[in-house]
Image: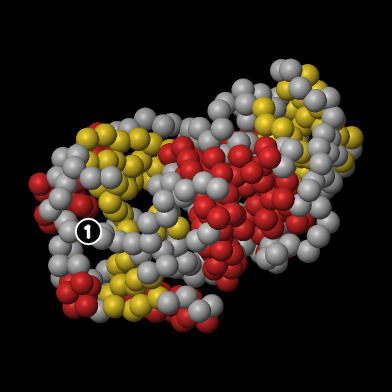
Amino acid sequence: MEKTADIVIIGGGIIGTSIAYHLAQKKAKGVVLLEKGMLGEGSTAKCAGGIRAQFSTEINLRFSLESLQTWNHFREIMGTELDFKKVGYLVLASSEEEWAVFQKSSDLQHQFGIPVELLSPREIQYRWPYLQGDDLQGGTFCAWDGYAGPYEALSGFTRGARRGGVKIFEQTEVLQILRDRDRVTGVRTPQGDMASPIVVNAAGPFAREVGKRAGVEVPVQPFRRQLFFTRPFSLIPDPIPLVIDYHRGWYFRREGAGLLISGPKDDFPSFNLNVDYEAMVEVARNSMHRVPIMEKVEIDRGWAGSYEISPDNHALLGEEPGLRGFFQANGFSGHGFQHSPAAGKALADLILGEKPIIDISCLSPERFKKGEMIREPLTAFKD
């Protein structure tokens, strides 16, 4: 392994590989990515692959629109098939308060040219008659939205990064981030020390632990989220949008011949990745409430992954105040996969001293110390 590098990226998930890819695209030299396990085995491996434009803050909308430029042309850019299924997102509101937020958010989305439709309960039941809508106030639908393959995206970024000269080392954990007072000087691994003036913390749910190895407090914590998959089920006609019951924090979509159904997200942090029977019961209850015909579906299996949640459900993206050369790229709070192209490009710009393609100053890690948190109304669901 190299003894020196110009830039070290810690974390081989979708964010770390995107940063590596975009640095390579800018002809950056001496870029090394270190992954403590195997590439993509963390949050990326258990990601549902959602891609949407229905956000309610300007920064997330800009991230979505910029990322769509990559997702919509992935094969031409990367030479890899992404299998982006544009089935749309249908987001359902059950209370008057939720519906008011949806309408306000759609106004902002329309300002960005996003074709979000506001639908009445009657329109929803006409277009998707398998949905139970007696308790709905309305919903929104955007045909630009959908889902894609996280593994395919990771593979595309990884191959592109390697073609550009990035050296990637799996099974290489960073034990300590070396520093000289207020300046990063490198990293320590079981294979030895590597000197570097720039280190990027893209460790996803492990970002807090990596920060501690630099003597930095990173306000990101892992929260377990469970997903379930059914046996083949043909009683709901295709195409099925990704349907979100906002009030219940539940969603489902097609997965192969069966369905993918979201389970609960824990309300306390942990690295627990076990699947609970109680979660399956909750999934069944929510599913039969919103889609009564799901009483005939059989759950086949489930898995659990980690969301990396920040205090305001927005990413930390930028240089750590008080430690020059240490950059944060974490805390995406369930949106890391879909925003990875824009995040990787913007941070690559910042690291290289260029003006980022998106103004990411509002995502600076120091915003929490300044009390400048970002407020987003639509934070109940993660994808």
Rendered image coloring scheme: secondary structure
Residue pictured at 42% horizontal, 55% vertical? 84
Locate residue 382: give its quadrant.
Answer: bottom left
Residue pictured at 72% horizontal, 32% vertical? 167
Count the labels in the image. Answer: 1
For this rendering, which residue is in front, 344 or 149? 149
Residue pictured at 35% horizontal, 64% vertical? 88
Residue 263 horizontal side relative to residue 340, left or right:
left
Residue 375 horizontal side relative to residue 323, left or right:
left
Residue furthest toward the right?
A: 180
For this rendering, which residue is in front, 364 or 356? 356
For this rendering, which residue is in front, 93 or 84? 84
Residue 137 horizontal side relative to residue 193, left or right:
left
Residue 128 horizontal side relative to residue 82, left or right:
left
Q: Is residue 105 above or below residue 195?
A: below
Element marked by disc 1:
loop
Q: Amino acid at mark 1?
A: Asp
Can you identify the residue that label 1 sits on?
Answer: 238
Assign the N terminus to one quadrant of the image: top right
Locate residue 150, reporting x and y percent. Answer: 47, 44
Locate residue 99: give its quadrant.
Answer: bottom left
Query: Does residue 171 show up?
Result: yes
Q: Residues within 10 Å of mark 1 (few under 14, many from 20)?
A: few
Q: Is residue 313 above or below residue 104?
A: above
Locate residue 358, reporting x and y percent. Answer: 68, 65
Locate residue 144, reporting x and y percent. Answer: 42, 67
Residue pictured at 30% horizontal, 36% vertical? 302
